[in-house]
Amino acid sequence: MSYPRSASAADASPDVRTGVRRGVAVLVLTLLAAAIPLWGPSAALHGTGEAAAPGAGGTALLRGVLFAALSVSLGELFVGRLADGLPGAPGERPSRWAPLANRVGCAAALALASVVATGNLVPRDLGQIDLGGLYASRDGRLALLEVNAFLLAALCARSRRPGLQLWPLTGVLVAEALRAHPVAEQGPFTGSLLTLTHLTCAALWTGGLPYTLRVLRLWRGGPAGAALLGRYARLAALLLAALTATGVWSALRRMPPGTVLDQLTTTAYGRTLLAKVLLVAVVAGLALWARVRLGRSGDPLAASAPARAEVVGLGAVVAVSGLLTALPLPIRWS
């Protein structure tokens, strides 16, 4: 004698299949994103006559992971504040990824600190790592600052006041901006300020969109969802404008105007920068498409498809950004 399946089992089956498909898609996209920094240095350096530092692929991957973790945490804080300010918005919020992201960021920062502790070489055993030597160099102190800041942010994220993680995460941003511009560089303060602004805008845009989509899914669309997506889209446009301005200015400082076109195709840094610019242009187009669909229908769920594609594009931008930090810089600054 056969018994019919219960309604709950029948209803759960599509949800399970959907979850499995999403999990497989995330895994595949993560592997593809990891391939960019791991194999990117050899592709970018091919035919340029330049040489990459030892372990450039691993360093680029760790830097990309650090940027991604920073973006997730800052994006949650950013969009959470937007959602809290909406009148009549539901009180429900998705589960926070920030605690895990901060721990992952701490692990990546610790691994990068171990590279600095061995003289910017990939350590082959624990005996090569001179942790005490980190305090003796500027790069070492900045690496330690990032480790401690992510650790403190992870503790704040698990506390009753998760908003406090903003301050240690700001410390990570400042440390990255200072690390990217050594004191020997011409105009290091200007360069650090540009990088700080660029990183902040990139983290808010990149981390804010996934959390916005998670909130929309939880709220199942509705007027509050449309208002949240519209508010995020307007601020994202401002973030993109600031990203473009600071990115162009920073590029012109490293590659003087008369050499830009040549270096974009003949140097590893220029090739990777060009790839990043093209990716950002594609992501901006997807963002515009999502905004148009939202304006036409008023339903935030109608804009979900291009917005999800935008998330994938932003992930690729983060991976390329990590690669960019591990490549040799142009020969001279302006």
Image (cartoon, rainbow, N blue to C red):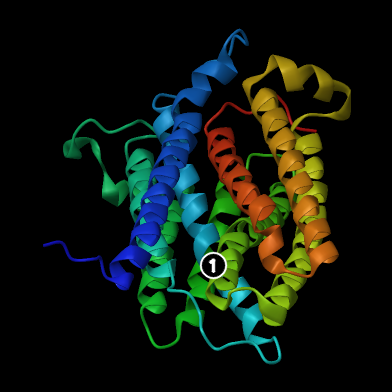
In percent of the image, x 49 and y 37: which residue is there? 33
Residue 29 screen position, x and y as percent: 47, 40
Q: Is residue 220 left or right of residue 168?
A: right
* Mark 1 residue type: Arg
Give the residue pinned by disc 1: 214
Q: Is residue 150 left or right of residue 123?
A: right
Residue 245 screen position, x and y as percent: 83, 49
- Give the image quarter of residue 126: top left
Q: Which of 306/187 is in front?
A: 306
| Quarter of the picture holding the C terminus | top right
How many residues crowd mark 1 within 10 Å: few (<14), some (14–19), many (20+)? some
Does the rendering let one see residue 330? no
In percent of the image, x 67 and y 39: which residue is there? 185
In percent of the image, x 40 and y 88: which residue is there? 160
Residue 231 screen position, x and y as percent: 76, 73
234 vs 199: above or below: below
| Quarter of the picture holding the N terminus | bottom left
Please, what secondary structure does the residue beneath circle 1 have? helix
- Give the image quarter of residue 119: top left
Q: Is residue 8 left or right of residue 330?
A: left
- Give the image quarter of residue 49: top right
Residue 285 screen position, x and y as percent: 78, 45
145 vs 21: above or below: below
272 vs 173: above or below: above
Q: Which of 321/56 is in front?
A: 321
**Residue furthest to the bottom:** 88
